[in-house]
Image (cartoon, grey):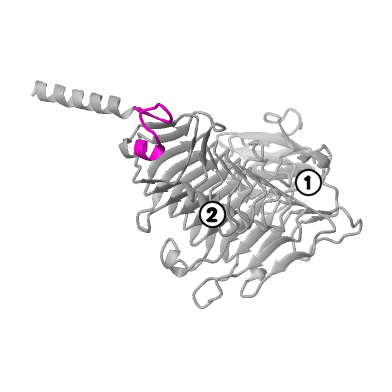
Amino acid sequence: MKNTILLAILVLLTGDAAAQRVLDVGPGKPYSNPQTAAAAARPGDTIRLHPALYPGNYYISNLKGRPDAWITFEGTDPDQVILEGSSEGLHFTDATYVHLRRFTLRGQTGNGMNIDDGGSFDSPTHHVIIEECTFRDMAASGNNDLLKLSGLDSFVIRNCHFENGSTGGSGIDMVGCHFGEIVQNRFVKLGSNSIQAKGGTSDLKIFANHFTNGGQRTLNLGGSTGAAFFRPAGANYEARDILVFANVIEGSLAPIAYVGCRNVAVVNNTLILPGRWIMRILQESTDTSYYLSCANNLFYNNIVVVDHALSTDVNIGPYTSPATFRFSNNLWYHLDQAGWGGPQLPVPETNGIVQKDPLFIQFSTGNYRLKPGSPAIGKGSPAFPGLTDFLGTPFLTIPSIGAFEAGTTVTTGLSTRLQCTIYPNPYRDKICIAGIPPGCHYLLVDARGVILSSGSLKPGDDCIPPATSAPCWLILRSGNAIKIELVTGN
């Protein structure tokens, strides 16, 4: 029995050691190309590409790591490990738990890199990380994408560079992809779109990316997909449940396009000089007896700067439901019309700010951080707690408008700086405050940042009433005890 247990332990140890292999690829290395190395890879292995020009058209199927043993597919230097030309650089199908990083794809005639589920819609490719990769210079002009994703779930695309895409294609094109994050990437000179999410795509976060001339529609949130390609099968929406925040978008004909999508929130972005429209609301899948109309989408806490190139503020197509959209707390500024009255929106906006200079630190060089005294500081809507800005700084409970948080929070302890008294502390069913100065507002949030109530406090003794809605300066964070934070900057 002891010998059997010892043998089992030795087998496990041997298996773990064997799993941690490096498969070297390149001139003079054990593997001449990535495809042959991938065929030999096991969970836990690293496929390492050494400097070379690789001709591409590498088809890699069933590259499968495990939750505890991902397969890493990496270049030693992203500027010297280059997959160049051919119809595709790399094509992964039915991959799981794979980390792709530090290489360049350029000059393809089909798609730069393709990741898909092999058409098996019920078993998506999943758990893929793509980072520190460059996708550029498509040698095509049609519907060709730098990075094409179909049936990919649970993924991250981070710190990548996309440049010079095909005229009719996208930087990142997603069909039926779910539970993904696209974060801190750079997009320059794209064709149709920088990012397109369609065909039943849902549950995405697109944040802290920088787009410059990102295509006809920088973010095409939806699209038009043949019924046979929707994932999940039978989905009656192009896209839903997408959160777009803390991005900087410069140029393009339309920075934002809502297309057959639902529950898409565009929050705390900075949009600079759109070429024709601020946004488009469209429905390209027009069989509304089956496909849901474009509806129930949000646009708030965004800074939008326009000039004379603007043609129509919001382009609204047929079969859409623009009356269901919500606009709130956006700052709109026209460089060329001093008396501009703001955009014509499909529904009235709440708490919008019109024709006030946002006071960027340096507009001419693209530094869109806010100067002290900016009218955008501390004027955002307080929804979506926990978001971070373009630089990774947490937005305050009452955030600044735009992609950069410029407000400051000074923690004052329990009462010293404000010279007031809070009781009982810890509190039970109510919180009372004595000594509040005139005109003070409050916001009560729990330990997670969820707003419990807000309102105005009168001088003297006052107890916080049931939940209301009002601007605030004073934040009371409740947990085992109460802490006061004084928000400054606005």
Determine whether, in the image, residue 22 is placed left or right of residue 272: left
Q: Is 39 or 193 nearer to us in this picture? A: 39
Image quadrant for the C terminus? top right
User: Where does label 2 land, which residue?
Assistant: 173
Q: How crowded is the residue under tag 1: few (<14 C-alpha within 10 Å), some, or many (20+)?
A: many
User: Where does label 1 land, which residue?
Assistant: 376
Q: Position of residue 393 (x, y in %)?
A: 65, 36
Q: Nearer the viewer, mark 2 or mark 1?
A: 2
Q: Which residues are magenta?
A: 21-38
Q: Amino acid type of disc 2?
A: Asp
Q: Secondary structure at mark 1?
A: loop
Q: Position of residue 34 (x, y in %)?
A: 40, 37
Establish if 435 lies above or below 258: above
Q: Position of residue 200 (x, y in %)?
A: 48, 61
Quadrant assignment, res 217:
bottom right
Q: Is residue 437 visible?
A: no
Q: Is residue 201 visible?
A: yes
